Image (cartoon, rainbow, N blue to C red):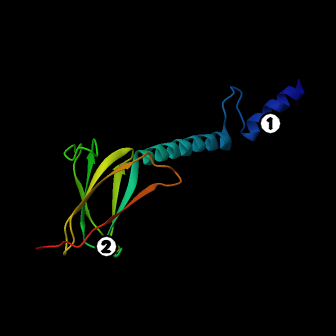
Amino acid sequence: MQRAEKNSAERVHSGVEADDGRKKGWEATMTTRLIVVGLAAILAFTGSLSAQELVVQVVESGWLPLPGTEISLSSVASCGQPNSALGERVTALTDRRGFALFHVPADARYRVDVSAQAGFEARTVCIRLFERSVALPTAYVQIQTKVSVTP
């Protein structure tokens, strides 16, 4: 009888569990924290899978970057149908290295329009982004423009 009482007293004192089987003390606090942190990590991970970074670089025919170029991005239903825009158009200017960053939903098709600028022709390309992977979270597209020839 004394041994059973001693074991019960040790369990309550150590903070492992109370008489009714619930956890108490630091173990209950740690379990709750681990659950909250785990749920936050799952939500952050799954939320980031729905959006993807797309980096578009615009270069001239000699592969030098074209800063200050306007790039428009539109979600399209099909690359074969030029007027199949699904959503709104997003626009950005390239930085000094010719890069523009977009945050877009993954697993979709996009029409990328590069405006004509400073003697270079406008370009339009259609791309398809697949589901992003953890190993490769950013998609890169490089578009080469040509010098516009005016008669």
Name the residue that disc number 2 marks: 61
Question: First in sequence: mark 1 or mark 2?
Answer: 1
Whole-number angstrom distance, CA of label 1 to CA of label 2: 78 Å
Q: Which residue is farthest top? A: 1
In the image, residue 52 sits, relative to residue 70, either above or below, namely: above
The one of 16 and 43 positioned closer to us in this rendering: 43
The label number, if any, that marks residue 147 in the structure image? none
The residue lying at 21 percent from left, 71 percent from top is 120
Is residue 127 among what the camera can see? yes
The amino acid type of the residue labelled 2 equals: Ser
Callout 2 secondary element: loop
Position above or below: 104 against 69: above
Residue highlighted by disc 1: 10
Crowd tier of the residue under label 2, counting other residues whose Cα lies within 10 Å: few below 14, some 14–19, many 20 or above: few
Nearer the observer, disc 1 or disc 2? 2
* 33 with respect to 74 (left or right): right
Q: Quadrant of residue 103?
A: bottom left
Q: Quadrant of residue 122?
A: bottom left
33 or 52, nearer to the observer: 52
Residue 147 % position (x, y): 23, 73
Q: Residue at x 89, y 28 (%)?
A: 3
Determine whether, in the image, residue 11 is placed left or right of residue 149: right
**How far across and how far down the image is residue 68, in percent?**
25, 72
Residue farthest along the front direction in this orientation: 151
Whether residue 114 is visible, yes or no, is: no
- The quadrant in which the N terminus is found is top right
Is residue 139 shown left or right of residue 20? left
User: Which x, y percent locates residue 113?
Assistant: 24, 58
Q: Is residue 135 left or right of residue 122?
A: right
Question: Nearest the camera: 45 or 56?
Answer: 56
Q: Amino acid at mark 1?
A: Glu
